């Protein structure tokens, strides 16, 4: 499931354009206290990942003999081990094959709905938005049984999935993720599109541009920043999705990487250092996305909350 | 072709933003009208087919007994029997409810409040504010399933850091008396940054002059916060309430990677899954659990939607 309830949040209305200093300066003494507390908390917050990183590079035998509070036993073999035992090459590929199409489809479909919502004012606009937004918030478990059973009944030709049905196919995950994520994207995009000056459509109409051209050639290029931010966010969400992948994919070799982590855990025996290496491998793609596109990521989350 | 801003508004209903002059919309040429219909219908079919129809079917199935293997006519309709069984004889149900409620209470009391405080402080001009923000919301990009594994490095009985530091032998993930709390701490690691981010966005929307005016009036920081900032953030507070409730209700990933939601970690979301992909497939029973989840969430979804719609109408 989406590990996040995506916020499409209306906020306090911005009274003035964002030319605002941050919430004021603190007095010197208070500033020092606040900075210290923040620094300590931030270190605590960074520690779990740091700890995983450190121990992913240590030999299991060494830490077993000397305890985890020791220093030494450096190795990279955990990564090689985890990579082959967890079969991460295969699962990364699965994740890629699910995430990329799902994100593209979500953005494409929701941008169409958003365009109609922003461009026209039909009587059903609010209802339509509600249908998508509410779907976003329903607990996925509540829909599991019918979706599971439906997918088992829907046959797929073998060139689409060797399981012969929607169950155990990437198509199932692509469609389910898309259906759930459209609400948030539609909301954000339609708000973004509403900020475009309406005159551009009037002149486009005078030029005889069809609705489709107004959408594809006029609106879409203008909302690129919003699309980029949403794409960043959606990539991490779909990559992180766990619930649907766990229940709809029962063939081990088809699991995306987030749900495949369990491969690293033996029933009775766990090599913590190996788990650490596996965790870092799985975290790496999203962390790279996060650090490379941090601005996009944050603005994606907050786009829904500001109405331009 | 009336855009919402241009639509002539009937003056008697100034609050209704959407009062479409139907006549003008009809001016769309047939080809364009078809385009609009297709643009809306394809996404709509997907969301109806994979969310709304299954939601309805869950309700229908909850009144039957079905192992899911036979055809639809093998369903034996039993009325409210499943619901009755859930609340009277299903041993996992009440613990699950209790755990979900603890989850909710904990998320509110600790990470939500902490996230809000962090946002209020980091919204100030402070050296390194960017760095702190990054540290707090980095866990937000990780999946909860992955977080379960990362925290195992602390919680593992034989190899975990906590036991090594304190010389204890506690099985933090396994002991049914404490594993819920261990899981909640791991959840909080992620949840705090998320809440912080939402409030930071909300605080950016607050007019600085409000705060200055309060400062001029001699209000101290705490008073300014409660009298000025908190009330202005009301819409955000509402959203946060809804998010926290829904997140607590959906809780699944972490408990599933640890022990599939058993032995102290029963939550409703996991119970539904157990009844479908567990050893016994009880579709009717599982559906009744699903419907209970849906009923609870629908209350909060309604609150959320009303909030959004009010903003939309004003916008």
Image (tube, helix red, strand yellow):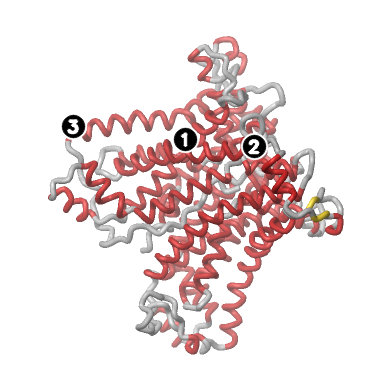
Any part of residue A77 in sight: no
Any part of residue B144 in sight: yes
* Residue A103 position by quadrant: bottom right
Q: What residue is disc 2 on? A: B256
Q: Residue B293 — which label?
A: none
Residue B108 sits above or below residue B80 on the image:
above
Q: Which residue is found at the position 62% from the left and 35% from the top?
A: B95
* Residue A29 position by quadrant: top left
Q: Residue B189 — which label?
A: 1
x%, y% of residue A36? 28, 29
Q: Who is closer to the viewer here, B56 or A28?
A: B56
Q: Is residue B21 left or right of residue B284?
A: left
x%, y% of residue A193? 44, 69
**Inter-mark Cα distance, 1 to 3:** 29 Å
Secondary structure of residue under mark 2:
helix
Residue A117 sits above or below residue A160 on the image:
below
**Quadrant of the frame with the C terminus of chain B:** bottom left
Q: Is residue B128 left or right of residue B252?
A: left
Q: Chain of mark 2?
A: B
**Inter-mark Cα distance, 3 to 2:** 47 Å
Residue A300 sits above or below residue A286 on the image:
below
Sooner in the amino-acid sequence: mark 1 or mark 2: 1
x%, y% of residue B312? 42, 67
Q: Which residue is found at the position 65% from the left and 56% from the top?
A: A176
Q: Which residue is found at the position 78% from the left and 44% from the top?
A: B281
Q: Who is closer to the viewer here, A151 or B110?
A: B110
Q: Is residue A102 left or right of residue A161?
A: left
Secondary structure of residue under mark 1:
helix
**Inter-mark Cα distance, 1 to 2:** 18 Å
Badge 2 local density, few (<14 within 10 Å), some, or many (20+)? many
Q: What residue is disc 3 on? A: A29
């Amino acid at each position: 499931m989406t590990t996040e309830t995506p916020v499409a949040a209306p906020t306090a209305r911005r009274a003035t354009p964002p030319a605002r200093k941050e919430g004021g300066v603190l007095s010197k003494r208070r500033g020092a206290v606040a900075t210290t507390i923040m620094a300590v908390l931030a270190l605590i917050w960074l520690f779990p990942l740091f700890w995983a990183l450190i121990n992913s590079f240590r030999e299991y035998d060494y830490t077993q003999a000397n305890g985890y509070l020791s220093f030494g036993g450096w190795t990279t073999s955990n990564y090689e081990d985890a990579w082959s035992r967890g079969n991460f090459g295969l699962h990364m590929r699965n994740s890629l094959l699910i995430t990329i199409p799902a994100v593209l489809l979500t953005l494409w479909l929701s941008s169409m709905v958003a365009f109609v919502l922003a461009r026209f004012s039909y009587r059903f606009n609010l209802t339509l938005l509600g249908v998508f937004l509410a779907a976003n918030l329903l607990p996925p478990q509540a829909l599991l049984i019918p979706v599971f059973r439906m997918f088992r009944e829907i046959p797929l030709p073998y060139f689409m999935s060797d399981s012969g049905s929607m169950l155990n196919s990437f198509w199932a995950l692509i469609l389910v993720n898309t259906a759930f994520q459209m609400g948030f994207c539609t909301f954000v995009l339609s708000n973004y599109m509403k900020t475009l000056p309406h005159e551009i459509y009037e002149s486009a109409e005078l030029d005889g541009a069809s609705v489709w051209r107004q959408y594809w050639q006029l609106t879409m290029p203008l909302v690129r920043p919003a699309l980029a931010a949403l794409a960043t966010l959606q990539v991490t969400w779909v990559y992180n999705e766990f619930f649907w992948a766990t229940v709809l994919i029962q063939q081990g070799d088809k699991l995306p990487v987030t749900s495949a982590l369990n491969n690293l855990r033996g029933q009775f025996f766990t090599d913590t250092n190996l788990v650490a290496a596996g965790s870092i491998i799985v975290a790496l793609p999203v962390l790279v996305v996060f650090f490379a596109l941090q601005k996009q990521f944050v603005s994606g989350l907050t786009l829904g909350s500001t109405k331009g | 072709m009336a855009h919402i801003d241009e639509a002539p508004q009937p003056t008697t209903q100034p609050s209704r933003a959407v009062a479409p002059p139907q006549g003008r919309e009809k001016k769309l040429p047939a080809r364009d009208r078809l385009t609009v219909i297709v643009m809306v219908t394809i996404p709509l079919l997907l969301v109806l087919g994979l969310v709304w129809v299954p939601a309805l079917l869950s309700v229908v199935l909850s009144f039957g007994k079905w192992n899911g293997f036979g055809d639809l006519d093998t369903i034996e309709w039993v009325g409210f029997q499943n619901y009755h069984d859930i609340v009277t004889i299903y041993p996992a149900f009440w613990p699950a409810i209790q755990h979900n409620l603890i989850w909710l209470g904990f998320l509110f009391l600790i990470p939500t409040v902490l996230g809000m405080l962090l946002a209020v402080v980091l919204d100030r001009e402070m050296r390194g504010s960017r760095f702190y923000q990054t540290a707090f919301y980095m866990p937000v990009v990780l999946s909860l399933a992955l977080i379960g594994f990362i925290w195992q490095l602390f919680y593992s009985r034989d190899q975990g850091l906590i036991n090594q530091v304190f010389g204890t032998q506690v099985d933090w993930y396994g002991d049914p008396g404490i594993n819920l709390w261990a899981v909640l701490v791991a959840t909080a690691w992620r949840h705090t940054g998320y809440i912080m981010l939402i409030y930071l966005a909300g605080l950016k929307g607050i007019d600085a002059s409000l705060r200055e005016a309060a400062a001029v009036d001699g209000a101290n920081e705490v008073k300014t916060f409660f009298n000025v900032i908190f009330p202005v953030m009301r819409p955000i507070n509402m959203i946060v309430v809804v998010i926290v409730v829904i997140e607590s209700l959906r809780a699944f990933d972490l408990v599933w990677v640890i022990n599939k939601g058993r032995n102290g970690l029963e939550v409703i979301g996991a119970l539904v899954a157990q009844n479908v992909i567990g050893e016994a497939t009880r579709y009717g029973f599982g559906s009744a659990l699903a419907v209970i989840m849906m009923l609870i969430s629908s209350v909060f979804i309604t609150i959320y939607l009303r909030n959004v719609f009010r903003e939309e109408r004003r916008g």
